[in-house]
Amino acid sequence: MNLTVTLGRLHLKNPILVASGTFGYARELAGVVDFARLGGVIPKTVTQQPRAGNPPPRTVETTAGMLNAIGLDNDGIDHFVAHHLPYLRPLPTAVIANIAGKTEDEFVRMAEQIGREAGLAGLELNLSCPNVSGGVDFAVNPEVTRRVVQRVRDVCPLPLVAKLTPNVTDITVIAQAAADGGADAVSLVNTLVGLAVDWKRRKPILGNVTGGLSGPAIKPVALRMVWQTARKVKVPVIGIGGIATLDDVMEFLVAGASAVQLGTVNFYDPTASVRIVDGLPAALSQLGADNVKDVVGTLTV
Ligand SMILES: Cc1cc2nc3c(=O)[nH]c(=O)nc-3n(C[C@H](O)[C@H](O)[C@H](O)COP(=O)(O)O)c2cc1C
């Protein structure tokens, strides 16, 4: 059984990745997850300057799904390079750094810096964080998306993944723009903007007022967007959104994802990713396939 997948210039040993912001900088999970089994690890988004993030409360569990407004709390790119990269670099799996710029120029500067570092398999551009006050949600605008990806590609030799927001009218237009800019793959989706209310206090529950909804509640929306995008756009799609089981992964692959990222599940079942890798060969065999590629996008309607 061949589990390897190729996404543009990005080569992974299997299609199971862990999503940015839900797996720390990997070392937090070292005693729990055998990194060598994963297709890849995407550490928390880093920004140019350190960020304190949003005021608390930053997370709230809703009836169906988790709402978060962390606000890209991180120590900045210099700290990432000096402190986290030496740990991440020798890990026996693909490490894909994830950056977010406040401006296009910041994206370009950070990508240039990250691109000089050895030991990374790729770079994911978080064009889609909904919680950054004062920031611009780059991936709501196709022209901005194309330009950021292209400018990053011009200065950074790493394979590029453009991470897109579901908070748009037609995500396929944005995905096409990322492809036009030279993205090796697009990853979708980031969280869906939501609101939790404490009616007795007549106040929002989150310090940031709104937050991003994630977890199994968003899976059908993410699946629909992956399916639409994979049918329309040539660039490989990495599916994200509520994936927690082997069945979820198979649904995303059949719908058109060439790989997947597991997010919120890491908070309540951090070994799910490894168990899914274990079960993947048997699930592929059930469809008569001996490799991942043969099932991708085979949904018939
Ligand atoms: C607490 C939390 C923090 C997150 N932080 C980031 C982040 O720093 N960068 C990023 O690109 N996505 C971040 N995300 C989004 C996830 O990577 C993922 O796209 C989203 O949660 C949907 O997948 P899921 O339903 O499997 O969680 C975060 C999600 C959660 C729940």
Image: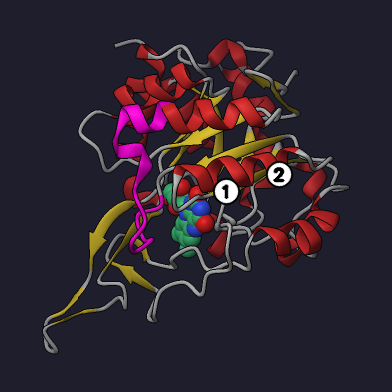
Q: Amino acid at mark 1?
A: Ile
Residue behind label 1 places its C-beta within 8 angstroms of ligand 1: no
In this view, which residue lies farthest toward the bottom? 201
Going 43% across and 66% down the picture, which residue do you hit? 71
Q: Is 183 displayed left or right of 166 in the figure?
A: right
Task: Check contact, mark 1 vs mark 2: CB within 8 A.
Answer: yes
Q: Does the magenta segment cover residue 182?
A: no
Mark 2: few/some/many CA within 10 Å (<14, 14-19, 20+): many
In the image, which residues are magenta?
Answer: 129-146
Percent across and percent down for residue 29 are 72, 62
The correct choice, above or below, for 17 with respect to 283 in the image is: below
Percent across and percent down for residue 58 are 40, 74
Residue identifier under label 1: 99
The correct choice, above or below, for 9 with respect to 30 in the image is: above
Mark 1: few/some/many CA within 10 Å (<14, 14-19, 20+): many
Going 78% across and 41% down the picture, which residue do you hit? 37
Q: How is the image coloured?
A: secondary structure
Q: Amino acid at mark 2?
A: Ile
Going 47% across and 33% down the picture, which residue do you hit? 148
Q: Does the magenta segment cover residue 133?
A: yes
Percent across and percent down for residue 4 are 72, 22
**Spatial separation of the CA atoms under disc 1 and disc 2:** 9 Å
Q: How many numbered badges does the structure rendering display? A: 2
Q: Nearer the viewer, residue 111 or 199?
A: 111
Percent across and percent down for residue 230 are 41, 18
The correct choice, above or below, for 284 with respect to 249 in the image is: above
Q: Nearer the viewer, residue 5 or 283?
A: 5
- Label at residue 114: 2
